[in-house]
Image: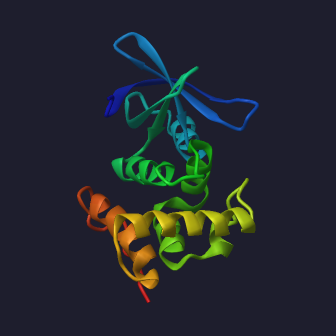
Amino acid sequence: MISYLKGNPIEVIKNTNNRVILVLEVNEVGYELQIPSKLGREISQEKLETIQVFTHLQIKDDQQILYGFSTTAERDLFRQLISVSGIGAQSAIALIDTLGLEELVQAIVTANIRILSRTPGIGKKTAEKNCLRIENQTITMDKTSRSNCHLFFCHAILRNFRRYSDDLIRPRLY
C-alpha cells in the first residue's frame, strides 16, 4: 500500500521490547516505523536531514504496523521470510538485522543452522524448524527434488533482488 516514505527523521526510539521505532515526518505528518536496529544506528549517527525508507504495512485485527527498511531488497527479503509459516515479523527483522542480506541468503541456500542460530531469539531448534518450513514451502511451490528446494527459494529471492542491484548479492553455490 505504501511503497516508501521520504522525509525528515525526528526521533529513533528503542523501546522496552528491543524494537527500534523511527518517527519520520512527511509533509507535517509523523509516521512511526519499526526498523532494524542497524538502520536506527545509521540514522542516529549520520544526522541526515531527509531519508527514504521502504515500507511494509502489516494489518492485524488489533493494530497496524509499518515496517521500514533502507533498501527495497531488505523489504523484499522481509516479505519472503514472513510468508513462511512460523517466521513472524520480529524474527524476520532479527534475521535481517543480525546477518545482513548476503549472509542470510547464503545461510538459507546452504541450510546453515549455525549461522541462522546466531540471531537473538532463534536457537538451533528454531533454525532447524524454519529451514524445514522454508523447504516445505518451496516443495509446494515447485515440484523439484529435495536437494533443489533451498535453491528454488533463494532463486526467487535473488531474482527479485537483481532487479534492484546486480552486485548486491553474489551467492556462492556449491
Q: Is residue 131 left or right of residue 70?
A: right
Q: Give the residue at x 66% y 69%.
A: 128
Vertical side of 31 occupied by 174: above or below: below
Q: Residue at x 57, y 35 (%)?
A: 44
Q: Does 85 appear above or below 7?
A: below
Q: In the shown orientation, is residue 108 left or right of residue 54?
A: right
Q: Is residue 2 above or below residue 127?
A: above
Q: Quadrant of the C terminus?
A: bottom left
Q: Residue at x 54, y 54 (%)?
A: 96
Q: Is residue 112 left or right of residue 74?
A: right
137 or 164, which is in the foreground? 137
- Image quarter hosting the N terminus: top left
Residue lying furthest top: 28
User: Closer to the camera, 62 or 20?
Assistant: 62
Residue 10 location in percent, x, y? 51, 21
In the displayed structure, 69 sits above or below 3; it is: below
